[in-house]
Structures are given as C-alpha cells and as structure tokens.
Image (cartoon, grey):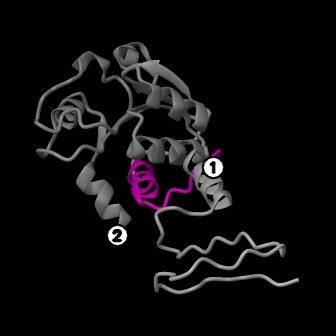
Amino acid sequence: MSYQSFFGIKEQVAEPEETDDPIADVNIFHWNDERIQTVQMAQANRDRNFTYASVLNLSGDGPGALVCIRAHLDPAGRAAAVVGAGGTARALAVSLRAAGARVTLYSRPSERAERSALRLGLSLRPLDELGDGEWEILVQATPLGSDGEGWFDPEWLRGRLVLDAVYGPRPTALIAAARERGLATVDRVEMLAAQA
C-alpha cells in the first residue's frame, strides 16, 4: 500500500495520477494558524466556557485588609457586610470568611452579584438594605465615593469598623463619617501598605 504526500509551498504543476490505493487524509496545521483542529477547537471552547468552583486570589487585597482589620479587632464570629461584587469585594469577602467572619454581600441587583454570591457561598442582599443589616465590619469595595461623594446614609454607620477600599480623596466621605461616629477605620492606602 502506498500513500502520496504533497508537502511544500511550491504550487503543484500536475495532478497526481489516479490510483486505487487509498490516499491518506492528513491535515497539517501550524501552531499559529487561525483554523485549528476540531479537537483543539472543542477543547478551547470548553476552556472558554469553564466555570471554576473555587478562586485562587493572588492579589494581596484580602490578606492586606485582614492585617488592618485585625489591628482593630478579630473578625472571627463577627458579622461583616461587604459592599460590591467585583474582584476586590470577592477577595475581601473570601478572606473575611476564612478568618471566621459571617459575611453578607450587598450590591446593586446584577447577574454578576448573584454569580459571585453563589460561587462564594455567601448571602446576597440589595445595597439599599445595608442600613437594615446587622454588621460589625463594613467593607466598601466599589467605585462609590471615588469622587468624594457621600453615597450612604450616615445612620447606617453603627458597627465597629469601616474599611473603604476605594481609590479617591483621603479621607473618603465614608471614612470621615465613620470617624465622626467613633468607628475604627481602614482606608485603601493603609490596606495597600499592609500588602507590602
């Protein structure tokens, strides 16, 4: 049995002779080709749509925040309200839960917030219910307040500690209001310094 192979970049001049011998059906791809083999395309699709059951957080946000929080109080057994559903909020929520806190996410209604709470195994409440929530530790991990605006009702601030992870003016309106009420505070700069 013989096989005919045609390799090279030179244009073929003549058609191969007709034969009864089977001709191998071979596709050769360069690793940088736009079109890849079917099995590779299927695997790439699976990888693209894979949902991870756990998260490996290589940022220092969670550990840095815990160092700062523990300088004021031990989070173990305490209720913690985490505002947000993005990467920083998730990192801080996971770190607080690992430290023994009872964590609730507060966020504007969104699929991302629901997915975050479900994946992390946390309860989720609407942001406008933050004032009704019971918490000793409040973590603010959204862009709210980055322009110096007060996005909260100061009456909500009745816990023990407020951490505001937003980049913006120092102090943020949230940190200033918490200090006026005698709460311990941690801002983004302190949290970053603790990561070093």
Disc 1 on helix, strand or loop?
Answer: helix
Q: Residue at x 53, y 31 (%)?
A: 115
Magenta residues, start to end: 52-70
| For discs 1 and 2, the disc positioned in front in the rendered view | 1
Q: Three-letter amino acid code at disc 1?
A: Arg
In the rendered image, the quadrant that contains the N terminus is: bottom right
Disc 2 on helix, strand or loop?
Answer: loop
Q: Is the residue 108 above or below the residue 140 in the image?
A: above
Q: Position of residue 132 (x, y in %)?
A: 41, 12
Q: Which residue is mark 2?
A: 196
* Residue 122 in view here: yes
Query: Within 10 Å of the Cα at label 1, are there few (<14), some (14-19), or many (20+) other Cα atoms?
Result: few
Q: Position of residue 185 (x, y in %)?
A: 29, 42
The reply to whether callout 1 and callout 2 are in contact (CB within 8 Å) is no
| Residue 51, quarter of picture | top right
Q: Residue at x 60, y 77 (%)?
A: 15
130 with respect to 172 (left or right): right
175 with respect to 98 (left or right): left
